[in-house]
């Protein structure tokens, strides 16, 4: 069993009218089976409304499955007594950096999680220092979050999760509200945590460039998992990706079009250097 | 406009007063305010002035900055003094039509004015020298005993610190919405009171919508970080009294003692 496991996970948003009668059912997640091993870097892709956020909220026990089961670190999220252990095992970073920073000073915000789980004062300071250093925000520890850039705020939010020593971090479009520089900063930080601290990463994103470093890519559409594999495997199926309304990275698309025109280029080119190398071989 | 209010804002310099435990400052301010109402002689005010002056000097907050805070309440000040001067019965020393000034009125007007000024300067000095975080922490600890009466002490202080975090964010957002609406021809400046109030509707509606969404997001983020109320929580920065704080309490006691002795026995 991996760190995160879902079996036939179904979640339905139920709309009710004023009297409480069911007006409509929206199946946001539909029979999803995923298994994430410890230390993996997983990217989840999907068009708007494909159910990514709904899936993510199950991994932190914010939502409970309508049907099926979710295990986090071997614990069933439907069982009440596991709740706080699960939230400590799988941390969650949200899209809007402003709406997840609680304190008025950076270091106090990072200390918020450890305070909640009752870590002794001395150790809180130690954890805060370690986590801020891990995301490269240590020199900003005494700053007000309001004065930071979007990317910096998001790194503080990540440090806030790291301070709880999770085994897995779920990030729901952490870069959606950032400028290109902020995006790079955050993605670099996430990769570092994955490689150096061996934290399992589940990254939900709209940006294809961000998934090429993942160990595995999961593509969702209409609440279902429709593709799964290494970035190379997934990106070699350009037609299919287009069908799921995803933008393929530009180099990949260019290589694909050239190949379609008859040039002998291999499938699933992910980066410009790789493309250049391939072209040079011709 | 909203940003111009200086009363009650933190003034960031490093001083002995700034470094005091917030509980000392809260208690000290409370005691000081009560003390202002305990006597009725000019010598008493002299003692209160000396104490306040000493604290101001130690706090290293410029006097001009402190007095600027008084501007906000100047109307209140005039009204109180005016009422006291004109409405206190006693020995008349000046009269015109229905207005008359009495000796007693002048005396109590002056007392009331001095009291109010001391009260406002004293309490704003506390907020000038204490960060909002410290203030809420101090309040939470001081009100701690009321938790046993099922008063939501922790929750209220958490609410206060979250409000403090989001006030600048919402102000910025107000600014942004205002500019966006102005660009579409909205007019927030001209017209009478009713027209002005009406023009606020397109400002307040999106602001409220966004505030509720933020609240929702924040609640989710807090839960995801294992927040479950004050129960079983530890503190990253627990409040601890140091030598400095005991000395400060001593000073406050000294002030009270001096006040008592001087107004009771020396110069009545
Ligand atoms: N609170 C809610 N109440 C009712 N329906 C909801 C709610 N949240 C999401 N949905 C619906 O569930 C479906 C999946 O939404 P979800 O937010 O999980 O998608 P997503 O993949 O995260 O999309 P996005 O890329 O826009 O973030 C959508 O059809 C959406 O309309
Ligand atoms: Mg989403």
Image: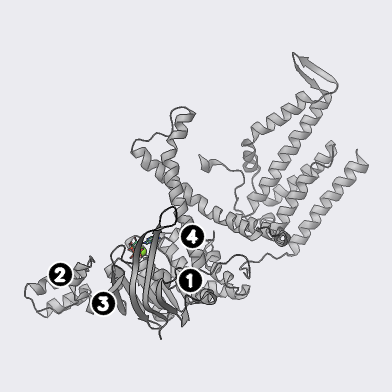
Which chain does tag 3 point to? A
Camera-nearest label, 2 or 1: 1
Residue A281, x across and y down, in percent: 12, 80
* SS at mark 2 in the image: helix
User: Spatial distance from mark 1 to mark 4, Cα to Cα?
Assistant: 15 Å
Q: Are marks 2 and 1 on the same chain?
A: yes
User: Spatial distance from mark 2 to mark 4, Cα to Cα?
Assistant: 42 Å
Residue B92, x across and y down, in percent: 83, 19
Query: Closer to the N terminus: mark 3 or mark 2?
Result: 3
Question: From this viewpoint, is residue A241 visible?
Answer: yes
User: Spatial distance from mark 4 to mark 3, Cα to Cα?
Assistant: 33 Å
Residues packed near mark 1 inside 10 Å, few (<14), some (14 to 19) or many (20 plus) = many
| Residue at which label 1 appears | A161
In the rendered structure, the answer to whether residue A183 lies left or right of residue B148 reads: left
Q: Are marks 3 and 2 on the same chain?
A: yes
* SS at mark 4 in the image: helix
| Residue at which label 2 appears | A254
| Residue at which label 4 appears | B218
* SS at mark 3 in the image: helix
In the rendered structure, the answer to whether residue A73 lies left or right of residue A253 reads: right
Residue A103, x across and y down, in percent: 54, 61
| Residue at which label 3 appears | A231
Color theme of the render: one colour
């Amino acid at each position: 069993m991996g760190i995160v496991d879902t079996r036939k996970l179904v979640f339905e948003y139920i709309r009710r009218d004023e009297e409480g009668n069911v007006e409509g059912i929206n199946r946001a997640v539909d029979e999803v089976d995923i298994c994430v091993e410890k230390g993996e870097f997983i990217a989840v892709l999907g068009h708007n409304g494909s159910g990514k956020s709904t899936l993510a909220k199950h991994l932190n026990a914010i939502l409970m499955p309508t049907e099926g089961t979710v295990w986090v670190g071997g614990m069933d999220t439907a069982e009440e007594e596991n709740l706080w252990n699960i939230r400590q095992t799988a941390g969650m970073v949200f899209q809007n950096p402003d709406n997840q920073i609680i304190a008025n000073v950076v270091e106090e915000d990072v200390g918020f999680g450890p305070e909640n789980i009752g870590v002794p004062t001395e150790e809180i300071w130690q954890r805060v220092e370690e986590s801020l250093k891990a995301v490269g925000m240590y020199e900003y520890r005494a700053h007000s979050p309001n004065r930071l850039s979007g990317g910096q705020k998001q790194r503080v939010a990540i440090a806030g999760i790291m301070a709880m020593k999770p085994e897995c971090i779920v990030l729901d479009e952490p870069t959606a509200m950032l400028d290109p520089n902020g995006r790079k900063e955050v993605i670099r930080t996430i990769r570092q945590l994955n490689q150096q601290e061996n934290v399992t990463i589940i990254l939900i994103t709209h940006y294809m460039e961000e998934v090429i470093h993942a160990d595995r890519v999961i593509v969702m559409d209409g609440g279902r998992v429709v593709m799964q594999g290494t970035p190379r495997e997934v990106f070699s199926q350009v037609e299919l990706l287009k069908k799921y309304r995803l933008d393929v990275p530009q180099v990949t698309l260019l290589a694909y079009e050239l190949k379609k025109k008859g040039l002998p280029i291999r499938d699933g080119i992910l980066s410009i250097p790789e493309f250049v190398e391939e072209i040079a071989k011709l | 406009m909203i940003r111009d209010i200086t009363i009650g804002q933190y003034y960031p310099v490093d001083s002995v007063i700034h470094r005091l435990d917030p509980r000392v400052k809260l208690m000290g301010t409370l005691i000081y305010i009560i003390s202002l109402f305990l006597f009725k002689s000019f010598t008493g005010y002299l003692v209160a002035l000396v104490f306040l002056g000493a604290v101001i000097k130690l706090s290293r907050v410029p006097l001009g900055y402190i007095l600027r805070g008084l501007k906000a309440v100047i109307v209140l000040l005039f009204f109180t003094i005016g009422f006291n001067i004109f409405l206190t019965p006693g020995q008349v020393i000046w009269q015109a039509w229905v207005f008359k000034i009495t000796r007693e009125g002048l005396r109590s007007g002056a007392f009331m004015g001095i009291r109010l000024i001391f009260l406002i300067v004293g309490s704003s000095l506390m907020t000038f020298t204490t960060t909002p975080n410290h203030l809420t922490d101090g309040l939470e600890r001081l009100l701690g005993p009321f938790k046993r009466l099922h008063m939501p002490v922790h929750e209220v202080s958490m609410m206060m610190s979250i409000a403090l975090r989001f006030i600048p964010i919402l102000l910025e957002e107000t600014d942004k919405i205002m500019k966006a609406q102005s660009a579409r021809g909205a007019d927030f400046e001209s017209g009478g009171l009713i027209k002005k109030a009406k023009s606020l509707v397109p400002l307040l509606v999106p602001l409220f919508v966004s505030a509720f969404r933020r609240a929702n997001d924040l609640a989710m983020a807090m839960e995801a970080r294992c927040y479950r109320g004050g129960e079983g929580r530890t503190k990253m920065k627990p409040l601890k009294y140091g030598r400095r704080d005991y000395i400060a309490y001593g000073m406050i006691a000294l002030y009270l003692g001096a006040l008592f002795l001087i107004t009771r026995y020396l110069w009545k």
